[in-house]
């Protein structure tokens, strides 16, 4: 989690580096659907701080994603190379029985966007991208006659790009965007009950659809 705090502090420093007298400041609340290769779809809640001069803005985002649809055990392997799914079969645990308990992803992202005005003061389209840190707190994997308790996953970095539309009047705007995240890494997950550690092909890459409200100052 220290890495996430360092990234957030860096983002705030960059935002503050833009002279306030020249910049517009806005805050946003966001909700969306985050799709991933490993876990299918989950709900995303987040916030955004934006500081920009003219059409270019620097942004810092933080959020929480939860309630993912699926765990694909084909992406999980023990250190000896055996697939977790094959081990579970020996215990009579079906893939459909698996459930993630208290699983969530904390994305912290920084980047830049460019807005192109279509209708003066009312409608904009925008695009941009940046880098992100994706922290996963400790969670449990539960199934029939089976449980696995993990440690937090702290080593996943990635990138992202977005394209969206922004509409509103005065200081209040609503927006919708499509955002693609690249975040994939092999990580070792420590488990309890004297089981060997699990090598996880942790792939959170996928397309998200985000909706939000932006308030400017």
Image (spheres, rainbow, N blue to C red):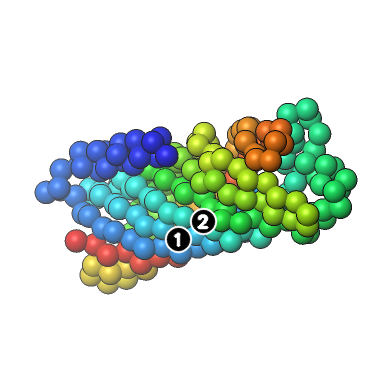
Local packing at callout 2 (Cα closer than 10 Å; few below 14, some 14-19, many 20+) is: many
Q: Position of residue 63 (x, y in %)?
A: 43, 54
Q: Nearer the viewer, residue 30 or 139?
A: 139
Q: Is residue 83 left or right of residue 46?
A: right
Q: Say which residue appears at 23% left-offset and 70% top-offset.
A: 170
Question: Closest to the observer: 27 or 73?
Answer: 73
Q: What is the C-alpha distance between the residues marked 1 and 2?
A: 6 Å
Quarter in which the N terminus is drawn: top left
Asked if the residue at tag 2 contacts the one at tag 1, i.e. Cβ–Cβ closer than 8 Å, the answer is yes
**Lateral position of residue 145 relative to residue 62, left or right:** right
Q: x and y percent of residue 69 in the render?
A: 66, 60
Q: Position of residue 141 (x, y in %)?
A: 67, 51
Q: Which residue is mark 2?
A: 65
Answer few, some or many: residues within 10 Å of disc 1's Cα (few below 14, many 20 plus, some between 14 and 19).
some
Query: Which residue is at the far left?
Result: 21
The answer to which of 163 and 109 lies nearer the viewer is: 109
């Amino acid at each position: 989690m220290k890495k996430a705090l360092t990234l957030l502090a860096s983002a705030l420093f960059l935002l503050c580096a833009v002279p306030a007298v020249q910049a517009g400041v806005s805050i946003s609340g966001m909700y969306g659907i985050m799709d991933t290769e490993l876990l299918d779809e989950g709900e995303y809640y987040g916030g955004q701080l934006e500081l920009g001069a003219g059409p270019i803005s620097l942004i810092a985002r933080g959020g929480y994603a939860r309630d993912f649809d699926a765990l694909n055990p084909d992406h999980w392997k023990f250190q000896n190379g055996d697939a977790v799914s094959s081990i579970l079969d020996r215990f009579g645990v079906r893939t459909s029985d698996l459930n993630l308990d208290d699983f969530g992803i904390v994305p912290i992202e920084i980047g830049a966007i460019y807005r192109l005005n279509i209708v003066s003061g009312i409608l904009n389209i925008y695009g941009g991208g940046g880098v992100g840190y994706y922290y996963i707190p400790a969670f449990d994997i539960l199934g029939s006659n089976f449980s696995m308790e993990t440690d937090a996953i702290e080593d996943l970095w990635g990138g992202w790009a977005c394209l969206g539309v922004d509409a509103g009047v005065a200081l209040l705007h609503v927006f919708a965007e499509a955002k693609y995240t690249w975040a994939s890494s092999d990580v070792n997950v420590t488990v309890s009950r004297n089981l060997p550690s699990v090598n996880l092909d942790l792939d959170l890459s996928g397309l998200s659809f985000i909706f939000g409200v932006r308030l400017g100052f």
